[in-house]
Image: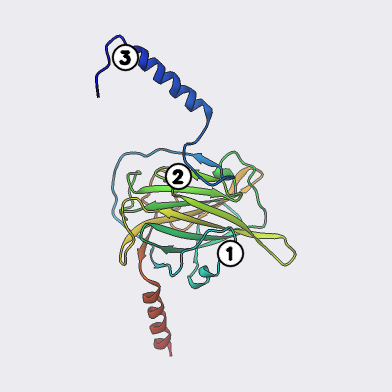
Amino acid sequence: MRRLGKTVVPLLLILVLAVGCQQNGSGKNEATQPAGITILPTHTPTPWATKEPAVHPVTADSYLLAPQLSGSYEAIWDAYEAIPLETVVRGKGSTKASYKFVWAEDTVYVQVHVTDATPDVSGSDYLKKDSVVFYLNENGEKNEVYSIGDSYCAVDRDGTLYLGTGCDGDRFRAVCYEELDENGESVGYYAEAALPLLTVRGKDGLTIGFDVRVNDAQDGRLAYALQWSDGSSHTDVNLHGVGLLTFGTAEENEGEGEESDESEE
């Protein structure tokens, strides 16, 4: 690349700055998603730090068939165990939630079931709407600040996607759909997400940091929040409190279940 003359550089810099300001003011997001899906960025990465792993070991299955995230319930999820969210992060409420988790070589799939009969997406951002937030810490070291391989992404009850720190907007996918009773009334909803792995590949025995949070809004404000592991309410900037997931196989887990049944007999 050739150097530009001294008299040209200042003019070039002025033009670059002017174009940059115009693009920033447009509010457009460069990430590509299917039509009808809104994407809103949130935070940016912060420097590297580490913290030793601690609590909440859970074994996640490899999937037998990949979930399609079609926007309707898929029977594939029936094969996996639901893990409850029991850590109250904020407020008081009756909302209940659980999640299921399966993995592939380069993606983890999560289904979250939320029992909440009062939809609310009137707030100004995802923390003030009915929403679900997913946190990944790929090296499993529960870093005190975000680095490469750490990410969080969110989806609200209407299906709007939010790109947090480290979230790959080109590969993150998520959908939400209502759970209806026999009268067609909403009693809750499902949120399903495909979370891309950026620095590791899924394999038996791999342990990663993971967490999931459910926000319950009322009148455009956060009224209640549940999370699987971290109760600090600061998982968007500090991963020290996330849980740990160890990758296994469906066949191994089924075998363990059969052995436990026999021992009880």
Decide if residue 86 is in sight here: no
- Quadrant (top left, top right, bottom left, bottom right) of the C terminus: bottom left
User: In the displayed structure, does residue 76 sit left or right of residue 5?
Assistant: right
The residue sitting at 49% across, 72% down in the picture is 79
**Percent of width and height locating residue 127:** 54, 44
**Percent of width and height locating residue 17:** 41, 20
User: In the displayed structure, does residue 2 sit left or right of residue 176?
Assistant: left
- Quadrant (top left, top right, bottom left, bottom right) of the N terminus: top left
* Identity, as a three-letter code, of the amino acid under mark 3: Val
Question: Residue at label 1?
Answer: 73
The residue sitting at 47% across, 43% down in the picture is 163
Q: Nearer the viewer, residue 68 or 203?
A: 68
The residue sitting at 61% across, 55% down in the picture is 93
Which residue sits furthest bottom? 265
* Identity, as a three-letter code, of the amino acid under mark 1: Tyr
Which residue sits furthest left? 2
Mark 2 touching mark 1, by CB under 8 A?
no
Q: Which mark is residue 9?
A: 3
Mark 1 vs 3, N-terminal side: 3
User: In the displayed structure, does residue 94 sit left or right of residue 109?
Assistant: right
Question: Residue at label 2?
Answer: 169
Mark 3 vs 2, N-terminal side: 3
* Identity, as a three-letter code, of the amino acid under mark 2: Gly
